[in-house]
Image (spheres, rainbow, N blue to C red):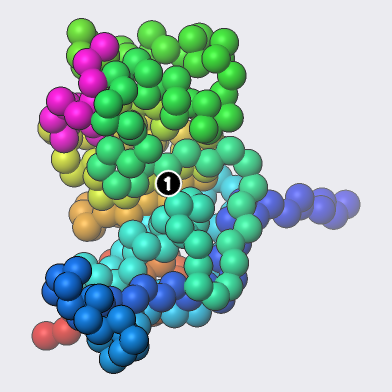
């Protein structure tokens, strides 16, 4: 008697994605005004991503690796809908939470409490749902009385604590995590890694950017390696880490 296996659904599809940034050579506003009609001579195109194409299935943990400037953080922002691709498109399924640039999504003049409700609302939670999660978010972030302080007075570590606490408490199907976790202290980093492993056990999907080969080997079941904006490897974690090291050259 044969058994038909149910295919695992795709939650992210990246299709021929390219991203171009324009780098201006003008060093001042005066130079921009003087060179306005000749502006094409004073700017260069920089392609951060070139024809990136891959699919991520539900329940997987995928590491995005590459040297500085390889395009991995840009790719994570495109996946998260923070920036639009110049060419190609991304399809997403389910609720997505992203922990990207330090302080991204926080309004500096609002308190931590106000930013919790603002961010949760953006991620699709009602006020009643956020109120239900609020104490747990504050406990996880470990920022105590600072929850009612404007976040512009927060340290980088406090930013990360609160941002991660919000991201993991909005019940995401997909969690995007950039290198910002490196900002937190060691006990909090361990706490975050434990939470990510809990998400894995629950079958959630994680896309993870890190320069730590040990973290990637510990967490990821697949690795995508970028070099100069293009995918040079997509496969098993150990082989991916070797491909990354080989891309650095002798």
**Does residue 88 lie above or below 142 as drawn?**
below
* Nearer to the camera, 65 or 197: 65
Q: At 21% across and 54% down in the image, what residue appears?
A: 212
Q: Quadrant of the C terminus?
A: bottom left
Residue interval drawn in magenta: 148-160
Q: Position of residue 233 (x, y in %)?
A: 40, 75
Q: At 33% across and 31% down in the image, what residue appears?
A: 107
Q: Position of residue 95 (x, y in %)?
A: 58, 38
- How many marks are shown on the rendered structure? 1
| Residue furthest right as drawn | 1
Q: Residues within 10 Å of mark 1 (few under 14, many from 20)?
A: many
Q: Is residue 107 magenta?
A: no
**Does residue 14 lie above or below 140 as drawn?**
below
Q: Secondary structure at mark 1?
A: strand
- Within the image, what quadrant is residue 35 found in? bottom left
**Does residue 54 appear left or right of residue 111 in this picture?**
right
Q: At 29% across and 72% down in the image, what residue appears?
A: 70
Q: Position of residue 84 (x, y in %)?
A: 50, 62
Residue 238 in view of the camera:
no
* Nearer to the camera, 39 or 67: 39
Q: Position of residue 39 (x, y in %)?
A: 31, 85
**Does residue 248 appear left or right of residue 141 in this picture?**
left
Q: At 55% across and 15% down in the image, what residue appears?
A: 127
* Nearer to the camera, 22 or 39: 39
User: Principal SS element in the magenta part?
Assistant: helix
Q: Is residue 157 magenta?
A: yes
Residue placed under numbered mark 1 in the picture: 176
**Does residue 27 appear left or right of residue 76 in this picture?**
left
Residue 197 in view of the camera:
yes
**Does residue 191 lie above or below 182 as drawn?**
above
- Within the image, what quadrant is residue 42 found in? bottom left
């Amino acid at each position: 008697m044969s058994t038909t296996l149910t295919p695992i659904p795709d939650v992210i599809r990246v299709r021929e994605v390219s991203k171009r940034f324009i780098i201006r050579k003008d060093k001042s506003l005066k130079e921009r005004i003087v060179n306005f009609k000749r502006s094409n001579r004073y700017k260069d195109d920089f392609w951060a991503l070139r024809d990136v194409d891959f699919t991520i299935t539900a329940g997987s943990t995928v590491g995005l690796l590459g040297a500085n400037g390889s395009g991995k953080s840009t790719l994570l922002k495109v996946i998260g809908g923070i920036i639009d691709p110049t060419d190609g498109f991304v399809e997403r399924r389910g609720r997505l939470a992203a922990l990207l640039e330090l302080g991204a999504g926080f309004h500096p003049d609002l308190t931590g409490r106000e930013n919790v409700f603002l961010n949760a609302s953006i991620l699709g939670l009602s006020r009643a749902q956020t109120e239900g999660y609020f104490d747990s978010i504050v406990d996880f972030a470990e920022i105590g009385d600072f929850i009612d302080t404007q976040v512009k007075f927060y340290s980088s570590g406090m930013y990360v604590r609160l941002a991660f606490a919000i991201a993991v408490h909005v019940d995401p199907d997909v969690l995007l995590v950039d290198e910002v976790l490196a900002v937190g202290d060691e006990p909090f980093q361990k706490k975050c890694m434990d939470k990510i492993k809990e998400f894995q056990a629950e079958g959630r999907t994680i896309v993870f950017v890190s320069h730590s080969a040990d973290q990637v080997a510990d967490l990821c079941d697949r690795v995508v390696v970028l070099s100069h904006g293009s995918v040079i490897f997509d496969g098993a974690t150990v082989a991916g880490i070797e491909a990354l090291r080989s891309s650095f050259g002798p």
